[in-house]
């Protein structure tokens, strides 16, 4: 099983979830779990828990990324973290190119996370081939890390505080109802 994280380092959550979001991203939002993100960077939290951990910079060549992902097909517990550093306008175009190419490189048990990690406004999106859950939720980075580990069947590591947002089969129960979540995201500027 493989985890692919696309980390838009200079893109905010507001830009990622804007009305101008690419069609593939809007489709994934309808299929996965997404929301605002608080806390530290994801790479250092996840790296120690995978047999193979690769940190790569994306420079606009989707074939280079496809080659990297093809080389990791079949690897057990593989984590590929791809940093996409240009400003939002370029990063979102590159993200659309990547999302169009990714289906050929991911297997059914793999997970995809997209993180907008601009310091002023962070957000995430997580999707798997068989996501039984979808919707919006706020999370700490540790919660997202635990969620990704749980989805891939990696045992909960000692010393990592937080809670998984979902299990492989069902969402965690939340006190917030959907209307309250929608209003919270509207207030944050994520939805109109």
Image (cartoon, helix red, strand yellow):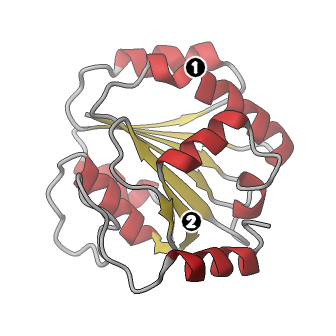
- The residue tagged 2 is 35
* Residue under the point 24% across and 45% down: 152
From this view, report whether residue 147 is shown above or below residue 72.
below
Q: Is residue 10 visible?
A: no
Q: Which mark sits nearer the N-terminus, 1 or 2?
A: 2
Between 100 and 45, the one nearer to me in the picture: 100
Between 107 and 146, the one nearer to me in the picture: 107
* Residue under the point 70% across and 35% down: 23
Look at the numbered disc 1 and give the secondary structure of its residue: helix
- Count of numbered marks: 2
Quadrant where the image shows the C terminus: bottom right
- The residue tagged 1 is 101
* Residue under the point 38% across and 55% down: 133
* Residue under the point 64% across and 66% down: 122
CA separation, marks 1 and 2? 24 Å
Image quarter for residue 14? bottom right
Q: Is residue 185 visible?
A: yes
Residue 149 left/right relative to 145: left
């Amino acid at each position: 099983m493989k985890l692919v994280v696309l980390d838009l380092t200079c893109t905010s959550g507001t830009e990622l979830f804007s009305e101008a979001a690419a069609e593939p991203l809007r489709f994934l939002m309808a299929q996965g779990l997404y929301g605002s993100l608080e806390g530290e960077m994801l790479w250092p939290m996840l790296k120690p828990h995978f047999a193979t951990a690769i940190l790569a910079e994306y420079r606009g060549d989707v074939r280079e990324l496809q080659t990297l992902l093809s080389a990791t097909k079949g690897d057990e517990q593989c984590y590929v973290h791809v940093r996409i550093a240009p400003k939002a306008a370029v990063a979102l175009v590159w993200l659309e190119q990547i999302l169009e190419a990714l289906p050929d490189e991911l297997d059914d048990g793999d997970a995809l996370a997209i993180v907008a990690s601009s310091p002023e406004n962070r957000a995430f999106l997580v999707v798997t081939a068989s996501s039984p859950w979808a919707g919006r939720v706020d999370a700490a980075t540790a919660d997202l890390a635990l969620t990704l580990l749980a989805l891939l069947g990696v045992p909960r590591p000692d010393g990592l505080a937080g809670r998984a947002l979902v299990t492989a089969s069902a969402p965690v129960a939340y006190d917030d109802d959907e209307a309250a979540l929608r209003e919270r995201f509207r207030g944050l500027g994520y939805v109109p």
